[in-house]
Image (cartoon, coloured by chain):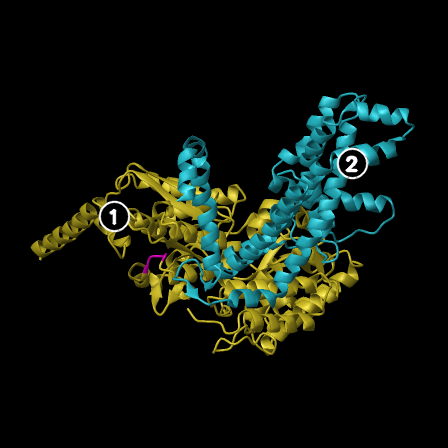
Amino acid sequence: MRSNRIKFVVLICSVFLIVSVFSSFGVIKASENEYPEDVVKDYPEGTVEIYGYGQPQYLLEYYNDWLERNRDIAPNVSIEITQTEGAADTREKITMNSVAGDYESLPDLFYSDPVNLLALAEGDLVQKVTNFVRPLEDKMVDGALNQATIDGTVYGMPASVRPQLIFYNKSILDKYNIDPARMDTMQGYIDVGRELKEKSDGEVYLSYIDPGHYTWRYYGRRGLMPQAEAKIWDDEGNPVIGTDPGAKLAFNTLDTMYSEGLLYKTEIFKPGLYDATNAGKIATFYIGAFWDEFLRKNCQETAGDWRVRPAPVFEDINLRGAPVTNYWAIANKPNGEYDGLVKKLWYDFNFDKEPREVWVKSMVEQNAPYANPISLEMLKDEFWKKPSPFYGGQSFRKMEGEGLVNGAPNLRITPQSAEADVIISAQLERYVAGDQTIDEAIEAMQKNLEDKIGQAESF
Amino acid sequence: MKLINIIRRNKHPYIFILPFFILFLVFKLYPLLWTIRISFTEWNGMNEPISVGFQNYKDLFNDYMFWDAVYNTIIYWLVGGFFIIAIAMLLSLLLNYKKLKGLKFFKVVTFLPNISAAIAMGLIFGMLFDQNLGIINELLEIFGINRINWLTSTKFSKIPVLTLYIWRFVPWFALVILSGLLKIPIEYYEAAKIDGANKIQQFIKITLPNISRILFFCFIIVTVNSWKMFNESYILKGPGTSNISLFQYLYQSAFTTFKMGYASAIGVVLIIILAIASAIQFIIRKRNAEI
């Protein structure tokens, strides 16, 4: 009996000892970081070139810290970011380098939106990453790979999947005794705008409207159109924006808000909007999660006033905003010697919990941009539910996660999407300028899509 | 054979100008011929160009955006050109006024806008013309005039572009005209004065005829500049295509919608317009026995 007990204790101790020894040598730790491909190897001296847009300098902070943690495999590697104007500018640079045969100047990694990513993929300028990201799909938020996939082949590694949220100034709503829960539906949202206008004698606006192409991008492509299940093209690729009931609903909703004077006309990302916001003239921002960095960076005078909730729905359709996915992609360089390294960078950025949290804390301190991770495991961590002082104790990160629930599918992407955006936006801009009614704008969109594009192709 | 003989006889001068011709062939002529070739294709910059004959040119003539861009560019050319040359003329007359104190200082200050970065100036002009915060509207309000949607209305959006364009280019043309004014012998004016001519008569009868060639040169340069305008309208973008320039539309077609063939067709149209402007200059100068 006693010898059995001794045997049992020895067995337990042995198991404990083995586990401890293996843990200290990193075997168990390594199993947590199982990369789908062999990316842990020695990398030659040199510079990893990244094309980024937005405010990529803040990501460089993460990259440099990450490099220091990976000196065992990349002892003499540095990372350099080239700032581009946007995804189209990145595409232009990559295309021109490729046309000129200057493959050495291609970046190792670039950020992209789905439209330009898929176009570059069609031109064989992007590496396929199917084998690397597919095994991780279950660990990511829903639909993270959808917009980077052509016929089952994946071309981009998702960097963020951000929901559409509504940001509202609680102090303003409290002042006029308005319950924010009313903004759960689009009709409720408009009614809140009307009430604000009436009670404030026209001093407070429901939101803003940009006279340029951002109105189509945010109110249209990413906002009202997907929520209204609108279509630009039918299944055969014929333009239907002029007849589609969803498109009509989306544009008429915008028209109601604009024609009733509920939207303050000013350029987005410009001092006019910062000043109006700080002066308490704008009650809500719809649509996009990026308003978080906009408000924190430019409207600190209103810190503590803002709250966030999921985008309002059209009652009969009941879909929140379509999530916005951004990708990291690897350029198809003939001797891409850092392909594995940038894959590891992406993996660690999205699945290595602690460094990501350290970086996010730094971003919060600097009022700099960051997004929720795409890793489901990471999102379970309490860190991503912590209250945010800027939002009066509400957790912005938690809301960012909740905002993805019941998101609308994005508008269909075609090789002609960039051109369609220019055509549609031009008419919407003329509408905002007061040159035509919304019905005339929709009619002109349809006609110009027919005349200039005809039938859209498929990726 | 005849050409080879000429080259052989004058080989040293030809060797001296050879570097220019090599650069011209590589960086000007070849891209130009390539542009013409691409204009007959459908190409997104990545896949193989597909030949489409004259389709891009046919599409151009049915494209309202193209015609808007042409119309805007004509406005920039005519209005901008007129004001640039007129204001440059006035400025150069002032700078040629010998009794003006601090002449060197004024000459330097006058030239400053031309050396300022176009994009930076565009951003500043954007702030000046801002509907809500811009100083222009603040000034208008002082005089009891309502705020104007300079950059957000299709009616007014060309005005900020023209203002920036004129502001940037007046100094350069003022210096060119000033160089012409300095060459007019002072005796002409002294003789005219003795004959009783007043300042306006002196200007019309002496100054203008003596700088007519320079003014013509300015007109040609302003024509070329106007048709190549990009920065001003790109930075101070108005609603839709209300103030887009032809060159900007070319860029947009190439690098926003990635229709390289279509953009090349616009480029060829631009080349034709500029070639006509140059040909007119050449013919007139030849007629005046200047060349």
A286 up-or-down from A345: above or below: below
**Direction from residue A297 to residue B79 in the image, left or right:** right
**Direction from residue B102 to residue B114 in the image, left or right:** left
Name the spot of residue A322 as percent of width and height, x first: 52, 66
Taking the magenta stretch, the answer to whether it contains residue B7 is no
Q: Which is in the foreground here, disc 2 or disc 1?
A: 2
Q: Residue at x 67, y 72 (%)?
A: A252
Name the spot of residue A384 as percent of width and height, x first: 46, 54
Q: Secondary structure at mark 1?
A: loop
Q: Residue at x 39, y 36 (%)?
A: B8
Majority secondary structure of magenta residues? loop
What chain is colored yellow? A
**In front of the other: A212 or B31:** B31
What chain is colored cyan? B
Kind of residue at badge 1: Val
Screen quadrant of the N terminus of chain B: top left
B4 up-or-down from A171: above or below: above
Kind of residue at badge 2: Leu
Q: Chain for mark 1?
A: A
- Circles 2 and 1, Cβ within 8 Å, touching? The answer is no
Q: Chain for mark 2?
A: B
Label 2 CA crowd tier, 10 Å (few <14, some 14–19, many 20+): some
Name the spot of residue A107 as percent of width and height, x first: 38, 47
Residue under numbered circle 1: A40
Q: Secondary structure at mark 2?
A: helix
**In front of the other: A306 or A205:** A205
First to last magenta residue range? A125-129
Residue under numbered circle 2: B208
Taking the magenta stretch, the answer to whether it contains residue A127 is yes
